[in-house]
Image (spheres, rainbow, N blue to C red):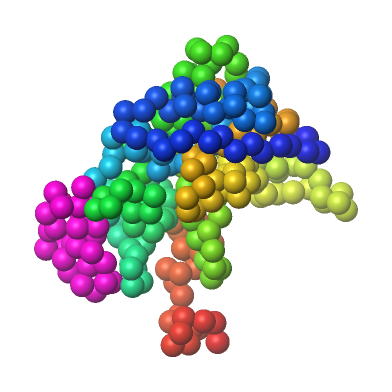
Amino acid sequence: MSRWYAVYALETGLIRDGDDVAERVVSAAEAAACEGIRDGDIILLAESAVATAEGRTVRLDEVVPSDEARRLAERYAIDPAITEVVLRESDRVVGGIPGFLLTLKNGTLLPNAGADHSNAPDGTVVPLPRDPDASAGRVRAEVRARLGVNTGVLVIDSRTHAMRLGCSGVAIGCAGLSAVVDESGRCDLFGRKLEVTKRAVGDCLASAAELLMGEADECVPAVLVRGTGIELNEEYGIPTIDASECLFMGAALHADPAAFDGEGKPE
């Protein structure tokens, strides 16, 4: 790992249905301060831009809510059409709070199954790319075909964390690098061997990119990271764990409700 790295915003302009994401990224990189894409660079793409280009946008006036969607919508104060999209996109609904359903999708815990109506045209929502790893792989292959360079590609989203305000980045699709690196066997500052430590490289990069992408009208759906020294490879995908192995979910499954006061705060 390098002692420094640089992060460049790639201003692609608004991405629309059918756009060639790789072409837009290559053009934006040539106009940016990074002066193009080089071997070893890592490209990070906002999931909403990728999903939009792949035709995933859903018009809410064309959605017919099911009885289950109407029940959950009333309970959690959510638009029934949005609730129906969330049900279609999620593997399981775990619970919710007003305005959001907490769902499991592809081994990941996330709100509303990733269906997002921010940065989407009025009356629409944009679900996650159908296969984020495949999306990352396609962009990587197309960049290599156009420029002859070896890159890593991450499709990223923003998420909240347990008991914390605000969002940070998380990788949901990966091609060309290890999204999680096992640090077991390395020594800490005092010579003790690490036993279980794993570094979420993809999520760390995603958080760095989110600072430039923003959450509003920045119009930066892609970021290029250079100089990390991260080894590129032919790996695809992001490792996940079962809910029972997750510190937060595993504990929540067996939590005593009396441990929290009426406002959801620890006693």
Quadrant assignment, res 77: bottom left
Q: Which residue is farthest right?
A: 190
User: Which quarter of the image is occupied by the C terminus?
Assistant: bottom right
Residue 203 visible at all: no
Query: What span is colored magenta in the figure?
Result: 59-85
Query: Left or right: 152 with respect to 90?
Result: right
Residue 130 image point, x, y percent: 33, 37
Residue 82 belongs to magenta span: yes
Residue 81 belongs to magenta span: yes
Nearest the viewer among 142 and 221 is: 221
Q: 97 above or below 39? A: below
Residue 108 image point, x, y percent: 43, 50
Quadrant assignment, res 41: top right
Nearest the viewer among 57 and 159 is: 57
Residue 237 image point, x, y percent: 48, 34
- Residue at 36 percent across and 28 percent down: it is 19
User: Which quarter of the image is occupied by the N terminus?
Assistant: top right
Residue 193 visible at all: yes
Query: Left or right: 177 with respect to 89?
Result: right
Query: Left or right: 104 with respect to 255?
Result: left
Residue 80 image point, x, y percent: 19, 62
